[in-house]
Image (cartoon, rainbow, N blue to C red):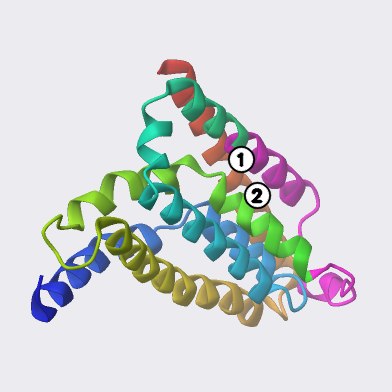
C-alpha cells in the first residue's frame, strides 16, 4: 500500500465515518448537556473520544469479532449501554441545565464528566458495531502495516473528526444558549429525550432480535 493509496483509503474511510459523526445522537446530546454546564465541555468530549478509542482497540485486537459471535455478550453490552443512556437521559430531562444555574456548579469534577462521556460512547453498541462493520473493509492484508495497526490508524481518523464536531457542538451550545435560559432548558430536555429514545430503541431491537 503506497502513500497515495494509503491517503485514498483514509479519505474514503473519513468520507463514510464523518456521516455518522455529523448525525445527531447520544454523543451530540451529551456534548450539548456539557455545553450548558460550566467549563466541562473539554472533559466531557475527552470522555466521549476515549470511548471511541476503546471501541477501536477492542475491534483491532480481534476481541470485537469474538464478542459479536456470542449473542449473549452482545446483548449484555446493549442492555448495559441502553440502561445507562436511559438513566442519563431521564436525569437530564427531569433536571434540565441552564447556563446561569450551571455557572455556580463548578464543583462538578472533570473526572466525573469524562467518565460519564466514556460510558456514553464506550457502552454504546452502535459505536462498537460501526467499527466492527467498517474498519475491516478499509484494511489491506498485503499492506506493509499490520491489519490491527491499520484499524487503529483509521479509528484515530474517526476520533479526530469526532473531536472537531463534538467540540463545536458543545461550545456552540454554550455560546448560543448562554443568555437564553428558557431555550437552554428546552434544549436540555430535548437532549434528554434523545438519549431516552436511543436507549428504548436499543432495548426494543433486543426484544425483537
Indicate whether 125 appears above or below 118: above
Disc 2 designates what residue?
A: 192
Is residue 43 visible from the viewing direction of this image? yes
- From the viewer's perspective, tell me whether residue 58 is left or right of residue 30: left
Q: Nearer the viewer, residue 40 or 23?
A: 40
Is residue 30 one of those drawn in magenta?
A: no
Is residue 183 visible from the viewing direction of this image? no
- Do tag 2 and tag 1 residues touch (Cβ < 8 Å)? yes
Q: Nearer the viewer, residue 146 or 67?
A: 146
Q: Residue at x 44, y 25 (%)?
A: 205
Q: Residues within 10 Å of mark 1 (few under 14, many from 20)?
A: many
Q: Residues within 10 Å of mark 2 (few under 14, many from 20)?
A: many
Q: Residue at x 56, y 62 (%)?
A: 50
Q: Secondary structure at mark 1?
A: helix
Is residue 103 one of those drawn in magenta?
A: yes
**Which quarter of the picture shows residue 197?**
top right
Magenta region: 81-109
Quarter of the picture holding the C terminus:
top left
Q: Residue at x 47, y 29 (%)?
A: 74
Q: Secondary structure at mark 2?
A: helix
Find the distance from the CA under tag 2 to the CA under tag 1.
6 Å
- From the viewer's perspective, tell me whether residue 43 is left or right of residue 170: right
- Estimate the x, y position of residue 26 in percent, counting from the top left: 54, 52
- Estimate the x, y position of residue 53 in percent, counting from the top left: 48, 60
Q: Nearer the viewer, residue 25 or 10?
A: 10
Residue 196: assigned label: 1
Amino acid at each position: 500500500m503506497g502513500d497515495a493509496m494509503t491517503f485514498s483509503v483514509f479519505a474514503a474511510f473519513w468520507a463514510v465515518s464523518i456521516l455518522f459523526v455529523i448525525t445527531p445522537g447520544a454523543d451530540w446530546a451529551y456534548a450539548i448537556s456539557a455545553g450548558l454546564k460550566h467549563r466541562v465541555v473539554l472533559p466531557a468530549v475527552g470522555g466521549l473520544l476515549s470511548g471511541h478509542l476503546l471501541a477501536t482497540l477492542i475491534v483491532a485486537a480481534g476481541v470485537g469479532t469474538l464478542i459479536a459471535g456470542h449473542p449473549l455478550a452482545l446483548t449484555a453490552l446493549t442492555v448495559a449501554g441502553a440502561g445507562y443512556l436511559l438513566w442519563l437521559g431521564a436525569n437530564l430531562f427531569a433536571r434540565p441545565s441552564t447556563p446561569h444555574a450551571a455557572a455556580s456548579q463548578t464543583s462538578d469534577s472533570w473526572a466525573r464528566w469524562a467518565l460519564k462521556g466514556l460510558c456514553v460512547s464506550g457502552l454504546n453498541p452502535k459505536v462498537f458495531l460501526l467499527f466492527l462493520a467498517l474498519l475491516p473493509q478499509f484494511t489491506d492484508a498485503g499492506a506493509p502495516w499490520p491489519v490491527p495497526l491499520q484499524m487503529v490508524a483509521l479509528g484515530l481518523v474517526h476520533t479526530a473528526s469526532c473531536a472537531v464536531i463534538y467540540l463545536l457542538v458543545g461550545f456552540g451550545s454554550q455560546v448560543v444558549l448562554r443568555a437564553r435560559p428558557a431555550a437552554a432548558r428546552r434544549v436540555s430536555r430535548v437532549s434528554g429525550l434523545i438519549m431516552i429514545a436511543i436507549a428504548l430503541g436499543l432495548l426494543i431491537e433486543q426484544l425483537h432480535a
